[in-house]
Amino acid sequence: MIRAISATACLAFAGLALATPALAQNAPAALPAAPQPVSMPAPVPAARDIPYPGVLKLTVDATDLDRRIFRVTQTIPVAGPGPLTLLYPEWLPGNHAPRGQIEKVAGLVLTADGKPLAWTRDTVNIYAFHVDVPAGAKSIEAQFQFIAPTASAQGRIVMTQEMLNLQWNSMALYPAGYFTRQIMIEPTVILPEGWKYGVALDVAADEGDRHRFKPVSFETLVDSPMFAGRYYRQIDLDPGGRSPVKLNIVADRPELLDATDEQIEKHRNLVTQADRLFGTRQYDRYDFLLSLTDRMGGIGLEHHRSSENGVEPEYFTDWSRMAPERDLLPHEYTHSWNGKFRRGADLWTPDYATPMRDSLLWVYEGQTQFWGYVLSARSGLWSRQDALDAFALTAATYDARVGRSWRALQDTTNDPIIAARRPKAWTSWQRSEDYYSEGLLIWLDADSLIREQTGGKKSLDDFARRFFGKQDGAYVPQTYAFEDVVADLNAVTPYDWAGFLKTRLDGHAEGAPLDGLTRGGWKLVYDDTPSAYQKQSENLYKRNDFTYSVGLTLKPNGEIIGVQWEGPAFKARMAVGMSIVAVDGEAYSARVLRDAITAAKAGDGKIQMIVKDGDHYRVVDLIWAGGLRYPKLERIKGTPDRLGDLLAPRKK
């Protein structure tokens, strides 16, 4: 039955009735306004290509070896009163990422004419410090400490009782608003008593342990780090040459400096072979900085007129087992041409606050990795067999990089910013800076293709000389884009180089680009014995690699440090961080696991393991009947040995 209702009730039901005074008293309060963004602070002044007025002065006291504290005093001339922004270097060359160690800066005090000045840190750009310069001030003085790590958990160790690595970008502020090449600075360092040093700067005065250098641009200073030490040796790598090339060595102990004449000659060969490759030297001097240590942190970092290199202490004194360490200097030396002189246009920046873009790292790092291998072989730092075995390991690693199915190689150029080189749980799936060594395979492919197309008359050497070898002695960077790379490849030999590169950079092909090996007269194969080079690598870096059999890489104690995505161990639900306690009833060792893999091939293909995961233990049945598999290169009969030609020393 339908009941009759009043007109007022109808309005109320419809939500249209006017509230009575009583009802209004009970109405809900108005909702608060939704939040709006707070305005951003004014941006830091953009860099301009004009000279900064005056010369900055910088003094670094590096004598506090016990507490590992660098004490910095800096004088910064100013043009007049008003706001000034000082920047601490953030986006660092060679790191391709914002890696400035601002967290290690402490005790910052600014003064003018001896009076303290208040400063504030920018709330958006935390590397920027704002200060008001008072009237009448001609300069301001900055004092602070760089608190270097005292334990490896705090970062890379850069100071020990025997040596130090001074990176000027960690020790100085610079005024915003100017290209760093337009800011002049005079650096001084105070070293521990009796220490000697290597640095690509010109000395103004050595006054005891106080060393003052001639003024340079802030850009050049940041690009000119120092190694100093109690035990130091300098070796001339180009006696009487057209420009000085020195090997500056610091070591944990004096006997580690005993390089033989034969070893020195191989390092001199590196300089000779690079000359023959590039045809020019893009520097006025070059200083290899080399640390032989297990106390200071390892490093491999390029600069235009020097490089920072850290290797095992016994690099010279146990030479026969150091092949995996001996391509470091060739790699970093190549960067003087590739990366420092020729640089991707979107990677070059006018200061250290402007973000870098890494899209061309497959040239910068990929071709440097390629030439690092080649120059290692041509100089004799590697034997021909070392080089072949290193190429085999690279080819196998990236042939098993299943992550290419979703992530193209080009995207890995973003990894310096995305991942900051932190370890990944599933590297074969996630990928990690693959532009280095998969990039090497692309350039090997290009080299063998040029050789094939030209009947052996030309090679990637011709591209290197054309692209990198310009204006002998010049070291002002010249930038390039993708189209410039393609144009110079076409100038060597016409081909669809744009399509060639884009297919390999942007594609998702199954397996690594191995055409360079095949066209070079070799193929990737596997057998049950690791090469001598792989054995050395595993011993040096304290790991055992079973990637190509059961899909595991382990520390000697059984801790899992690598699991191949979708491999046998993955399918057995094993992961990085777990540990293998026992294999087929026997306590874990690399030998026991090798024996079990071999036995499983002849048996039922099952390997039983006890795995520790935190406080939990479980029994794992890992299924693999393929036996041990280690990568090698094997000659393809009846084909030209183009790879062998690539590795042979150049006579002129």
Image (spheres, rainbow, N blue to C red):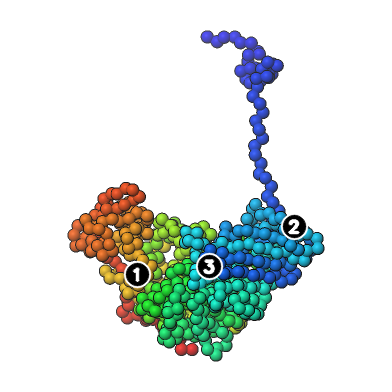
- Residue position marked by numbered label 2 in the rendering: 132
Residue 281, given in percent of the width and then of the height, sits at 56, 82
Along the line of sight, the residue nearer the viewer: 507 or 84: 84
What residue did someone put label 3 on? 65
Work out whether residue 180 can be spotted.
yes
State which quadrant residue 560 falls in. bottom left
Q: Amino acid at mark 1?
A: Asn
The local secondary structure at tag 1 comes to helix
- Residue pushed farthest left? 603
**Earlier-in-chain disc, 1 versus 3:** 3
- Picture quadrant where residue 311 is located: bottom left
- Measuring 70% from the left and 64% from the top, which residue is drawn there? 141
Residues at badges 1 and 3 in contact (C-beta under 8 Å)?
A: no
- Where is residue 267? Give x, y as percent: 46, 82
Instruction: Judge the density around disc 3: few (<14), some (14-19), many (≥20) Cα neighbours within 10 Å.
Output: some
Kind of residue indicated by mark 3:
Leu
